[in-house]
Image: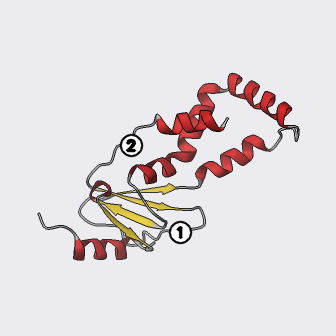
């Protein structure tokens, strides 16, 4: 199962648009967007731990016997392959994107298609101020 999940994760491409702000965090971290960003920024929020809940749900009713659990999971996967593949992709998309941008820790907010990363800030307005102060000159 883990090899299959790894294969699915590695086969997903990541598209970053320059005028997007990507917020990376865990489900316990709350990002504030009270003050919407100006200049037509698009905000996307990604959870890096989203797959944990899916894994817990999938393993909830599995046998405690490893061999039986493997058989149960294989049968479930065969019956629900397309749906499960989409669920895995969606659940782990934040981790996939974070890895593709070399995000080192969370919370993190990215600008310029991931070229500029601000760590430790959950307020998007504050992150934009920091970005504007330090952004590369064009």
**Could you say which is closer to the camera, residue 46 or residue 125?**
46
How far across and down, in percent of the image, does residue 31 sit? 48, 68
How far across and down, in percent of the image, does residue 93 sit? 50, 46
- Judging by the rendered image, the residue that carries numbered circle 2 is 14
Q: Quadrant of the C terminus?
A: bottom left
Which badge, 1 or 2, is on the more N-terminal residue? Answer: 2
**Could you say which is closer to the camera, residue 37 or residue 71?**
71
SS class, disc 1: loop
How far across and down, in percent of the image, does residue 54 sit? 67, 45
Q: Quadrant of residue 125?
A: bottom left
SS class, disc 2: loop
Q: Residue at x 43, y 65 (%)?
A: 108
Q: Residue at x 29, y 49 (%)?
A: 17
Characterize the local packing of mark 2: few (<14), some (14-19) or many (20 or more) Cα atoms within 10 angstroms.
few
- Judging by the rendered image, the residue that carries numbered circle 1 is 30
Q: Quadrant of residue 33?
A: bottom left
Q: CA distance from mark 1 to mark 2?
A: 24 Å
């Amino acid at each position: 199962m883990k090899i299959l999940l790894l294969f699915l994760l590695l086969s997903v491409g990541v598209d970053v648009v320059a005028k997007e702000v990507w917020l990376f965090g865990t489900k316990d971290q709350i990002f504030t967007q009270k003050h919407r960003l100006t200049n037509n920024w698009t905000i996307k929020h990604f959870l890096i731990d989203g797959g944990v809940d899916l894994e817990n749900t999938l393993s909830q009713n599995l046998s405690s016997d490893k061999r039986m659990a493997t058989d149960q999971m294989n049968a479930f996967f065969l019956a629900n392959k397309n749906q499960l593949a989409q669920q895995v992709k969606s659940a782990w998309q934040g981790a996939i994107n974070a890895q593709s941008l070399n995000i080192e820790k969370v919370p993190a907010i990215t600008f310029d298609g991931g070229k500029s990363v601000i760590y430790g800030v959950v307020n998007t307005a504050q992150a934009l101020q920091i970005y504007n102060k330090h952004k590369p000159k064009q």
